[in-house]
Image (cartoon, rainbow, N blue to C red):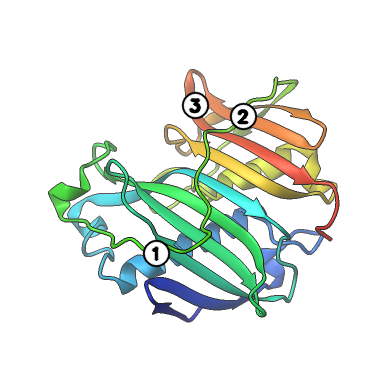
């Protein structure tokens, strides 16, 4: 994925391939979030905030929350333009925006996420000022603003999942994007061919290899809410509103 920064915004072009999509030929939500993470990493590297400034000093980026507005999911073999930019730091957290656009500039997907930095050994949040971590903000007209947390729906079912080795990332925990594989495998909507129109996700404590997770969920029509927990520890909460038309 070749990328360049224009006026503070990272731009990259990308062709959706077979491993990016589900059986309905739509971009998998887990792959979408992986792409967002890759873009964020590329942007940090290009502005001088690579691993020499973070991981090599014992600190790592962690995702706290993410919200996504979807007009249409990209489809197999579609050529898209990817964009990301940071906005003003808030109380030690770093907001980051993403867009997926068509080659003609139509917005398919917009997202805003909130990132923090933790000490790799203690797993505690650090003050970025103590490490001279500064991300220059960019303001884009019309960019999305983060709303409140996921709005609950009463639970009607609970499934279980044990975290395998293959879901663990370089930070030693269940990869952020893998939560969306678990959700898509649990909720019936994605398998039936529905695509999300809005996603509101919030991360809690880390889930480690071998963790026995309970996925509790409920729905109101095509709107779903789920919580992934391990005993009293919450790892992930999500609200997904699925579109009933216009995505295929």
The CA span between labels 3 and 1 is: 26 Å
Q: Residue 79 at x, y = what percent?
A: 67, 78
Q: Secondary structure at mark 1?
A: helix
**Quarter-wise, where is residue 246 in the image?**
bottom right
Q: How many marks?
A: 3
Residue placed under numbered mark 3 in the picture: 234
63 on left or right of 68: left
Q: Quadrant of residue 186?
A: top right
What residue does disc 1 label? 41
Q: Is disc 1 surrounded by few (<14), some (14 to 19) or many (20+) residues within 10 Å?
A: some
Residue 171 can be seen in this image: no
Residue drawn where x is 81% and y is 49% of the image:
194
Image point 63% across, 52% down: which residue?
69
Q: Label for residue 151?
A: 2
Q: Mark 3, residues whose alpha carbon is within 10 Å: few (<14), some, or many (≥20)?
A: some
- The numbered mark, 3 or 1, whose residue comes first in the sequence reads 1
Establish if 78 lies above or below 24. below
The residues tagged by marks 3 and 2 sit, at their Cα atoms, a distance apart of 16 Å
Q: Position of residue 205 (x, y in %)?
A: 42, 32
In this rendering, the answer to whether 240 lies above or below 101 is: above
Which quadrant of the figure contains the C terminus? bottom right
Which tag, 3 or 2, sits closer to the chain's start? 2
């Amino acid at each position: 994925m070749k990328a360049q920064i224009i006026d503070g915004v990272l731009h990259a072009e990308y062709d959706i391939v077979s491993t990016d999509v589900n059986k309905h030929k739509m971009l998998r939500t887990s792959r979408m979030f992986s792409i967002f993470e890759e873009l964020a990493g590329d942007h940090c590297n290009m502005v001088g905030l690579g691993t020499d400034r973070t991981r090599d000093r014992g600190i790592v980026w962690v995702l706290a929350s993410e919200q996504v507005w979807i007009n249409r999911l990209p489809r197999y073999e579609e050529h898209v333009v990817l964009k990301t930019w940071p906005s003003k730091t808030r109380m030690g957290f770093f907001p980051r925006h993403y867009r997926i656009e068509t080659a003609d500039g139509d917005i398919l997907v917009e997202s805003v996420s909130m990132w923090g930095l933790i000490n790799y050994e203690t797993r505690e949040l650090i003050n970025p000022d103590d490490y001279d971590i500064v991300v220059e903000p960019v303001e884009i007209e019309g960019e999305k603003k983060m709303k409140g947390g996921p709005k609950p729906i009463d639970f009607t079912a609970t499934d279980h999942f044990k975290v395998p080795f293959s879901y663990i990332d370089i930070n030693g925990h269940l990869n952020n994007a893998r939560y969306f594989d678990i959700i898509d495998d649990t909720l019936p909507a994605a398998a039936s061919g529905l695509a999300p129109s809005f996603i509101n996700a919030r991360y809690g404590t880390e889930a480690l290899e071998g963790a026995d997770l309970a996925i509790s969920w409920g729905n109101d029509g095509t709107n779903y809410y789920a919580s992934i927990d391990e005993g009293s520890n919450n790892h992930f909460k999500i609200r997904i509103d699925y579109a009933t038309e216009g995505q295929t």
